[in-house]
Image (cartoon, rainbow, N blue to C red):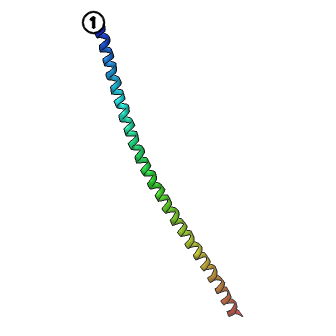
Amino acid sequence: MREINKYTSAVAASIEQQSAATGQISSNVIHAAEETNVVGAVLGRVNEAATHTSASAGAVLDGSQAVEAAVSELRTEVEDFLRKVVA
C-alpha cells in the first residue's frame, strides 16, 4: 500500500508540474500573440508613412520639373532678348 501511495504521489507531482508548464506555455503563447498584433500595427503605420513619403517625393519631383521647365523657358527668352539688344 505504501508503494502505491508513493507512486500515486509521484504521479500527482508530475501532473502538477506538467500543469504548471502547460500554463506557462499558454501564457507565453498569449503574450507572443499580443506582441505580434503590436508589430502588425506598427508595420501598418510604417507602410502608411512610406506611402505618404512617396506621395510627397512625387510632389517635390513634379515641382522641381516645373521649375526646371520655367528656368529653361526664361533662359531662352533672356537669350532671345539679349540677341535683339545686341543686333
Q: Is residue 67 left or right of residue 42?
A: right
Q: Is residue 8 left or right of residue 47?
A: left
The structure residue drawn at horizontal position 40% and vertical position 43%, both measured from the top left corner, is 35
Which residue has dot 1 on it? 2
Q: Is residue 86 left or right of residue 20?
A: right
Pick the front one: 47 or 66: 47
Quadrant position of the N terminus in the picture: top left
Image coords of residue 64 (percent x, y): 57, 72
Picture layout, residue 2 above or below residue 74: above
Image coords of residue 71 (percent x, y): 61, 79
Element class at badge 1: helix
Image coords of residue 53 (percent x, y): 50, 62
Question: Label 1 amino acid?
Answer: Arg
The structure residue drawn at horizontal position 30% and vertical position 6%, both measured from the top left corner, is 3
Q: How many marks?
A: 1
Quadrant position of the C terminus in the picture: bottom right
Image coords of residue 57 (percent x, y): 53, 65
The structure residue drawn at horizontal position 30% and vertical position 13%, both measured from the top left corner, is 8
The structure residue drawn at horizontal position 40% and vertical position 47%, both measured from the top left corner, is 38
